[in-house]
Image (spheres, rainbow, N blue to C red):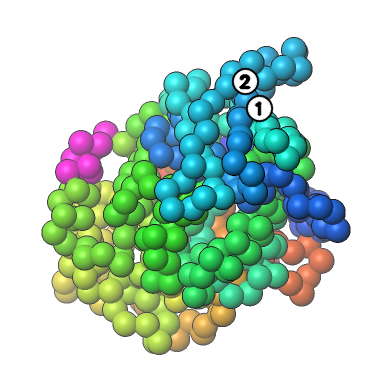
Amino acid sequence: MCSTLLNRARISLMGLALFMTASSLLFAQPARGLARGKAEPPVRRLRYTWWSDPATSAAIGWEQGVLDAELYYDEREQWSETGELKQRAEVSVARRVSDTRWVHLTQLKPDTAYQFQIKTSAGDSEAFWLKTAPNEPKEMSFIIGGDSRNHRKTRRLANQVVAQLTPTAVLFGGDFTAQDTKRQWRKWLDDWQLSISEDRRLTPLVPTRGNHDSERSLKRAWGEAYPQFYYALSFGGELVRVYTLNSERPAGGEQRAWLEADLTTHASSTLKIAQYHKPMRPHSGMKIEGFDEYDHWAPLFKQHQIDLAVECDSHLMKVTWPIVMDSTGAQGFRRVSKGGTVFIGEGGWGAPLRKVSDPKSWTMKSGRINHVFFVEISPQGGYTLRVLEVSEARADVARPWQNFMWRRASNQGSLPPVERR
């Protein structure tokens, strides 16, 4: 499945050793867009996210030290033929952040590459490019993780995994920084430049609020399209619906009502993914149970078939068997053979790791490792999940953890996990 994506990432389904070898060379590359030892570029801290339909829009943000800015763009295919960027987009200044600029491109073509360049009186940026999401079912992938707040070296290594795999999007589960200061956010955005591929492709990030993130800072970094930081985006038409929830706000009330209404409206979505920060049932004894999230969201996950739930906060790695809410089950959940939700997490993008001190009877795999998840999705809605361990101690930086692989078929039946040692 998803052979095109894997070939682009230099991974083979027949043997992931190719990825280990190639990554040792790739991860030695310096950051794109932030050259060391040179004058500060006129445009810095680039990022790409979505404020509306991922198939037809793109929100591009950056920082600069001068007032003027113009962004020119065109389809990458056209640009490669003419060498010109013929379309000009309006640039806006972020509210309360005088050095941040945003362009919201709309009416773009789905599943299309766009080249762009930013021009200022202090100089022009390099030419970068991005790709819109598809609006019909086709192969796609996500890198999933969170908690990048402390160990900068690990965070930078994980960002380089994004540059290597260039997924459809990064689903980031919150806790970007430790103290949520402007200084720490500048460093985080500097490090994010390592997610830009060698040919200068930007990967979009879908942000979630963590307990170390203020909504004010998230709006500075990612815009003000979602003032309460719970929202949903569709990929591949109705192939995938991604729900970003805010565990720093009450799970009930307005948030639950919105979630239930959207799940009902998008009942035909083949694969539903939810991401939020605080786990319902954390796998660290240092964390309290997520009763609010469990009481208000778990019933909807069961009723509307949330397939994959991404949790963070505990600074460890876990993958559960498919489970559903059941008051008579272990800690309120029961394992099922068909349907159910696979819960993954719990944040390992660079935060201090914790021991898995509270595993559950329905836990499939867990470990005390820095990691990201790589999820590949088929046009039929099945998915393959891999855990990529990020390590400062090894030359290859990231490798499939214990060769663990979990596959789920499009009919909501599950194949056994594949483990090779």
Q: Cβ–Cβ below 8 Å for labels 1 and 2?
A: yes
For image coordinates 42% across by 48% down, the residue present is: 95
For image coordinates 51% across by 28% down, the residue present is: 90
Query: Which amino acid type corresponds to the residue marked 2 in the rendered image?
Result: Asp
Where is residue 197? Give x, y as percent.
Answer: 71, 44
Which of the 4 image quarters holds residue 161?
A: bottom right
Distance between mark 1 and mark 2 Cα atoms: 6 Å
Number of marks in picture: 2
Dot 2 crowding, Cα within 10 Å, few <14, some 14–19, many 20+: many
- The residue under label 1 is 115
In magenta segment, residue 115: no
The stretch of residues the image draws in magenta is: 261-268
Q: Nearer the viewer, residue 271 or 61?
A: 61
- How would you classify the magenta stretch by its main secondary structure? helix
Q: Nearer the viewer, residue 362 or 188?
A: 188
Dot 2 falls on a residue whose secondary structure is strand
Disc number at residue 206? none
- The residue under label 2 is 74
Where is residue 223? Give x, y as percent.
Answer: 43, 47
Quadrant holding the N terminus: top right
Evaluate whether residue 312 shows in this view: no
